[in-house]
């Protein structure tokens, strides 16, 4: 199922990789960020916090950051979709405003279908908001000219731990 998730994410222009542990996830994310990165991150997600993200670059507000690091509640294997919910320490701006969105999630959070992921989100406390991220933000004008990054990140990457 994880291979299917990564394949669907890549088919939609994203990047995906499975790593063994949090140390490997940190190394992968450092590679995605490059040197002199500006970043923002969720401080309300335990997996993100294990990365020690503040040490990966210069921390700034989402509107000025080159990359945003979030967790993800679930990944959907059928479509390569990331399911994100928001709350304390989990701002929507982190995955929306920077040019690069990097989501970190545990391997056991990959589910076969969107229906199953949404059902699990709503089985507990209803979140204040939920976003479904399937690839980079894209839109087309009336002449069918596609523009990437008009309303969100130009690049989306998922790092699956475990």
Image (cartoon, grey):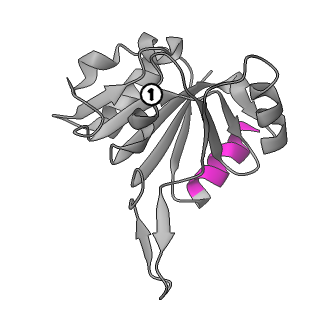
Quadrant of the image occupied by residue 125: top right
The answer to whether any part of residue 113 appears in the image is: no
Identify which residue is drawn at 83% across, 31% down: 119
The residue labelled by disc 1 is 91
Label 1 element class: loop
Residue in the image at 39% along x and 55% along y: 154
Graded by Cα atoms within 10 Å as few (under 14), some (14 to 19) or many (20 or more), the crowding at tag 1 reads some
Asked whether, in this view, residue 145 is left or right of residue 160, the answer is left
Q: Residue at x 60, y 60 (%)?
A: 11
**x and y, in percent, of residue 69 in the image:** 41, 30
- Quarter of the image with the C terminus is top right
In the displayed structure, 110 sits above or below 101; it is above
Identify the main secondary structure in magenta.
helix
Determine whether, in the image, residue 52 is placed left or right of residue 48: left
- In the rendering, at what x and y percent does residue 104 appear? 52, 28
Image quarter where the N terminus lies is top right
Q: Position of residue 12 (x, y in %)?
A: 58, 59
In this view, which residue lies farthest toward the left?
36
Which residues are the magenta region? 1-10
């Amino acid at each position: 199922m994880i291979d299917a998730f990564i394949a669907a994410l890549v088919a939609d222009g994203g990047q995906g990789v499975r790593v063994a542990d949090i140390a490997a996830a940190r190394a992968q994310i450092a590679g995605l960020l490059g040197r002199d990165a500006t970043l923002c991150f969720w401080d309300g997600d335990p997996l993100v916090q294990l990365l020690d993200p503040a040490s990966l670059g210069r921390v700034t507000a989402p509107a000025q950051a080159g990359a945003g690091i979030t967790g993800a509640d679930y990944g959907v294997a059928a479509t390569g979709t990331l399911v994100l919910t928001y709350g304390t320490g989990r701002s929507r701006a982190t995955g929306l405003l920077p040019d690069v969105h990097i989501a970190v999630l545990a391997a056991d959070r990959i589910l076969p279908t969107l229906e199953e992921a949404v059902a699990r989100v709503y089985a507990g406390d209803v979140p204040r908001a939920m976003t479904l991220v399937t690839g980079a933000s894209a839109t087309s004008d009336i002449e069918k000219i596609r523009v990437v990054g008009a309303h969100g990140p130009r690049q989306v990457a998922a790092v699956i731990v475990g």
